[in-house]
Image (cartoon, rainbow, N blue to C red):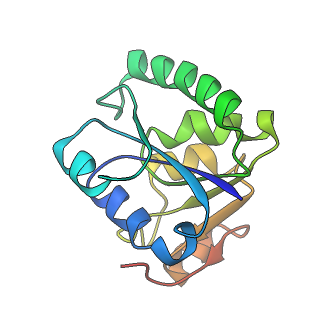
Amino acid sequence: MKILIACSSGGHLAQALALKPWWEQHERLWVTGPTPDAKMKLAGERAIACAWPTQRNIPNLVRNTRLARRVLRDFRPDVVFSTGAAVAVPFIYQAHSVGATSIFLETVDRIQKPSLTGRLVYPYVDQYLTQWEQLHDRLPRSNVVGLVL
């Protein structure tokens, strides 16, 4: 199985890295910000830098939409997975264009209501995962996976 993991650096990346028992057994490609912590944490991994910053940045959203189109076409993942934030949107939106299943894991600090990214991808994502039962109550299509970190 081929997995594309698109997430922001920092806490989003930390949560994706915590799922190593799942992703380490598969071919994978990371897409994240070109930050020092991401470069350090992904040393030895195949990674592509997205246009940065991503939060509420329309020009970089357009750049990352183009990046997603190109990366998805070339890598052809079976699964597009994200923990957020904004870099997730163009990859989740375009996952089906290459026949990939899309999975979004809402971050641990989202207990009562979803993040902006979560609200944007919820209608399109194949699996929406939450870490808290309270959030699942607001998003009926979600699945509770419990705490990742």
* Residue most extreme to the front: 44
* Residue most extreme to the right: 99
Rendering quarter of residue 96: top right
Which quadrant of the figure contains the N terminus? Answer: bottom right
**Front one among 109 and 69:** 69
Rendering quarter of residue 145: bottom right
The answer to whether residue 99 is left or right of residue 41 is: right
At horizontal 71% and vertical 39% (from top left) the residue drawn is 76
At horizontal 67% and vertical 69% (from top left) the residue drawn is 142
Q: Position of residue 38 (x, y in %)?
A: 27, 48
The answer to whether residue 97 is left or right of residue 50 is: right
The answer to whether residue 46 is left or right of residue 70 is: left
**Front one among 22 and 14:** 22
Which quadrant of the figure contains the C terminus? Answer: bottom left
Q: Where is residue 125 in the image (x, y as percent from the top left)?
A: 70, 51
At horizontal 31% and vertical 28% (from top left) the residue drawn is 52
At horizontal 58% and vertical 43% (from top left) the residue drawn is 120
Q: Where is residue 47 in the image (x, y as percent from the top left)?
A: 42, 42
Q: Give the number of callouts.
A: 0
Q: Where is residue 92 in the image (x, y as percent from the top left)?
A: 63, 42
The answer to whether residue 95 is left or right of residue 58 is: right
**Front one among 24 and 94:** 24
